[in-house]
Image (tube, rainbow, N blue to C red):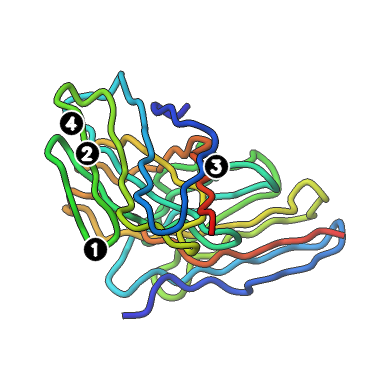
Amino acid sequence: NAGVMQNPRHLVRRRGQEARLRCSPMKGHSHVYWYRQLPEEGLKFMVYLQKENIIDESGMPKERFSAEFPKEGPSILRIQQVVRGDSAAYFCASSPSSGDPYNEQFFGPGTRLTVL
Amino acid sequence: DAKTTQPPSMDCAEGRAANLPCNHSTISGNEYVYWYRQIHSQGPQYIIHGLKNNETNEMASLIITEDRKSSTLILPHATLRDTAVYYCIVRAMNRDDKIIFGKGTRLHILP
């Protein structure tokens, strides 16, 4: 059973460009979470999605950031008009559908975004 | 904000047991204690969780005090590969919501 997959692993963008980060959850998992880790800081929650629905986006910046988890395909975290402050590691996690009482989240290897 | 308090860093000699403490004095009755770790440049890795009984798996043991206000993660025979930041997290059961990570404990395993 493959783990959570993220791509690309490293992404370099110039200021003003768009960044698209992809996350494929573990097989059978329908919940996806995105976290951001700025250099030398802890992980911060961004958004929680289920298939075709955003459940909690309380950690998402109000502008330039969006996320989706379509019925088919990976979850996408999209950052428009990137700025240097967006440089960070972005981690995706997945968990099984509701009914699992233990709520374990499985994390991917992350995408490291560098904005020049 | 995280509901846990951990020492910022600890050292442990290779081959010895690493004991990582965590305080969670405001834990609620329906909340579990979870431990994750993050090895440098990798995604967090689940280690273990527990409610009130001590738990053990192939990675570690979790000792929770009777009043549930604190716990200790034990790595019985630490190796250099156990060098990582260890996060103690309190989460409600049957909830799918986000993990709130604190600053964790940076564990250095010394050769």
Looking at the image, which residue is at 57% across and 42% down? A42
Disc 4/disc 2 C-alpha distance (Å): 17 Å
Dot 2: chain letter: B
Q: Of the residues under marks 2 and 1, which one precedes in the sequence?
A: 1
What element does badge 3 sit on?
Answer: strand
Tags 2 and 3 touching, CB below 8 Å: no
Q: Which mark is residue A44?
A: 3
Disc nearest the viewer among 3 and 1: 1
Q: Position of residue A57 (x, y in %)?
A: 50, 42
In the rendering, which numbered label is found on residue B30? 4
Q: Secondary structure at mark 2?
A: strand
A20 over A37 or under it: above or below = below
Camera-side residue of B14 and A58: B14
Q: Nearer the viewer, residue B78 or B7?
A: B78
Q: Chain of mark 3?
A: A
Residue at the spot 45% in from the left edge and 46% down from the top edge: B86
